[in-house]
Amino acid sequence: MSGAEEAGGGGPATGPTGAVPAGAGAAAGSAAALGEAAGPGIPDEAGLAGARQLQEAAGDPDAPPKKRLRAAEAAEAAAGSGKLEERLYSVLCCTVCLDLPKASVYQCTNGHLMCAGCFIHLLADARLKEEQATCPNCRCEISKSLCCRNLAVEKAVSELPSECGFCLRQFPRSLLERHQKEECQDRVTQCKYKRIGCPWHGPFHELTVHEAACAHPTKTGNELMEILGEMDQSHRKEMQLYNSIFSLLSFEKIGYTEVQFRPYRTDDFITRLYYETPRFTVLSQTWVLKARVNDSERNPNLSCKRTLSFQLLLKSKVTAPLECSFLLLKGPYDDVKISPVIYHFVFTNDSNETDYVPLPIADSVECNKLLAAKNINLRLFLFQIQK
């Protein structure tokens, strides 16, 4: 026996050029594909046996629907489609939530990936606990200055297929949002007569049939007036706010300034985080702003819901009561979402600070953005009410 035959170990015979016959090559390729589909750490024999069972189930009309679907998916995976995407999902996922990032992707100095939401949450938790934020994988220090975005991963993730939640078809993630909002025939939509009270919600492909049979266009004038009256009530508060702002803008004495909240710690046995601005001058008076998290809750880092509240303090002496309206808005270079809320207070030498009032941020996600920042930069408007 020659050395080549000994090395082959009784393998398939080769032709004059050493090529494997087509039938044998196809069989070997199928076995390798099925072995890979079985997953790492599972013997090829077990993968082949499982694949045979799934193939039998796929061809059996009496098999349960779920089993037939799983068999079809396994057969597709065995054929070689989808395997690369599955491996990329595990490589490109966030190391914190283990999900594919939906927007920005950040990486630590050792290259571990974090989605924007988890990255901001880690920085906010570290600020609340007075600790240095660290990567959950390698424990290296992370911050907005130490970490950078990974644009290559963001691009790769945007090209990975993702399933539409309505029609269950696969689309690149970069096109999925447009498909779900504008193109999907199964997307949830509303009747065009919703403004006169129609509550219908349903798939887009049923919209034409519903609108043709909708009873709301045939309602009487009195019925429509009742519906419109209820809708007007929901808009009345919003209009009242804007009318109040326009009224304040007509005052003679108006002042505004950029304020920077800086983080500090209390001197208690269990220190608590609070924020305070340097002294600033508006309307010829000296002021300070303070803020606290979750109304000085003992362990705000253990709470999923996070809020900020603030108070305005008058530091200079006044000869007469000073009645003011004030509101905080986002600064010119921040993207935090703050709804305008007007507060009123009469400042005197004996009563020179307001109660803590809520900072009207949208939700806990926006609060984490502020906590993760080195400082909180906002804009304060003050209106002096003269009688």
Image: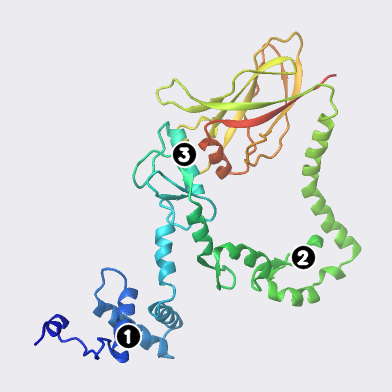
Categorize mark 1 by other alpha carbons within 10 Å: few (<14), some (14-19), many (20+).
some
Can residue 101 be spotted in the picture?
no
Mark 1 vs mark 2: in front: 1
Q: Residue at x 46, y 83 (%)?
A: 65
* Left or right: residue 313 compared with residue 231: left
Q: Is residue 69 above or below residue 160?
A: below
Mark 1 belongs to which amino acid?
Answer: Arg
Categorize mark 3 by other alpha carbons within 10 Å: few (<14), some (14-19), many (20+).
many
* Left or right: residue 61 compared with residue 49: right
Mark earlier in primary sequence (3, 1):
1
| Residue annotated with mark 1 | 52
Mark 2 belongs to which amino acid?
Answer: Cys
Mark earlier in primary sequence (3, 2):
3
Q: Which mark is residue 198?
A: 2
| Residue annotated with mark 3 | 123
Judged from this view, the residue extending furthest toward the left is: 1
Q: CA distance from mark 3 to mark 2?
A: 45 Å
Residue 17, given in percent of the width and then of the height, sits at: 26, 87
Q: Secondary structure at mark 1?
A: helix
Q: CA distance from mark 3 to mark 1?
A: 50 Å
